[in-house]
């Protein structure tokens, strides 16, 4: 069983495209859990309107912003899946992305699998001057890794290491920490 955990905070400009790309995957998933981390924008309404009649999902609403690690953990704790997929609100997936991501789990020893990101030129063109300067080295290149954007974890392994560290990591560093913890299994 595959559970998708999608934390949302200020995602109104991107979350619909993310959901569109999720719904056309060649591999099915079993549940979608959307964690609204007290988003002050119209993300919740966009999600509700887009998914209405297309897909049932489990909404989790934080009354105040708690950060990414806590959002992941909230979603994981409410999920039923053996495989937990973390997905950021601004990621657009290729149609076979979920299939490729979960494929390594046929090997029982695999505890985590990452994605390959491509930073498109069309996105870079929309940036301001300083963003273009910073991100120019990434344009058109592929980057593999595990950083929470679109990764898969074996639930039993996450539970064994105590899930994401929501005390020390609010919005950055939780990905490197979970990789470090999982590598010690």
Image (cartoon, rainbow, N blue to C red):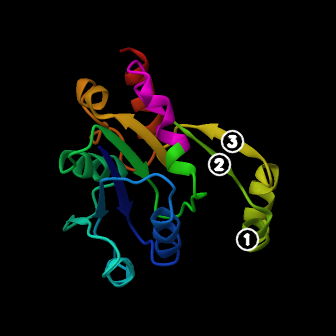
Quadrant containing the N terminus is: top left
Q: Which residue is mark 1?
A: 127
Residue 99, compared with residue 6, is above or below; it is above
Q: Quadrant of residue 81?
A: top left
Report if the CB atoms under discs 3 and 2 are less than 8 Å apart: yes
The residue segment tinted magenta is: 100-113
For the residue pair 7 and 101, the one nearer the viewer reads as 101
Which secondary structure lies at badge 1? loop
Q: Earlier in the sequence, mark 3 or mark 2?
A: 2
Residue 143 circle label: 3
How many numbered discs, if any? 3
Q: Earlier in the sequence, mark 3 or mark 1?
A: 1
For the residue pair 124 and 17, the one nearer the viewer reads as 17
Residue 63 in the image: state x and y as whole percent: 19, 68
Residue 2 in the image: state x and y as whole percent: 33, 46
Which secondary structure lies at badge 2? strand
Q: Earlier in the sequence, mark 2 or mark 1?
A: 2
Report if the CB atoms under discs 2 and 1 are less than 8 Å apart: no
Picture residue at 43% right of the left edge, 27% below the top = 106
For residue 142, side relative to residue 175 (left or right): right
For the residue pair 176 and 108, the one nearer the viewer reads as 108
Residue 24 in the image: state x and y as whole percent: 51, 65
Instruction: Single out the residue that lies furthest toward the top.
Output: 184
For residue 108, side relative to residue 145 (left or right): left
Q: Which residue is mark 2?
A: 117
Residue 34 in the image: state x and y as whole percent: 31, 63
Q: Quadrant of residue 121?
A: bottom right
């Amino acid at each position: 069983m595959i559970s998708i955990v999608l934390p949302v905070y200020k995602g109104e400009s991107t979350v619909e495209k993310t959901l569109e790309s999720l719904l056309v995957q060649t591999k099915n998933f079993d549940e979608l859990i959307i964690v609204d981390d007290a988003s002050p924008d119209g993300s919740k309404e966009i999600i509700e309107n887009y998914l209405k009649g297309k897909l049932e999902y489990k909404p989790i609403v934080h009354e105040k912003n708690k950060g990414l690690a806590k959002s992941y953990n909230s979603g994981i704790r409410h999920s039923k899946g053996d495989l937990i997929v973390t997905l950021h609100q601004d990621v657009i997936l290729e149609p076979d992305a979920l299939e490729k991501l979960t494929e390594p789990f046929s090997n029982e020893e695999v505890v985590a699998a990452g994605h390959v990101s491509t930073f498109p030129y069309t996105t870079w063109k929309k940036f301001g001057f300083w963003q273009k300067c910073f991100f120019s080295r990434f344009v058109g290149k592929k980057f593999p890794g595990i950083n929470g954007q679109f990764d898969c974890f074996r639930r039993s392994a996450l539970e064994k290491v105590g899930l994401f560290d929501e005390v020390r990591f609010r919005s950055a560093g939780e990905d490197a920490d979970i990789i470090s913890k999982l590598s010690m299994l």
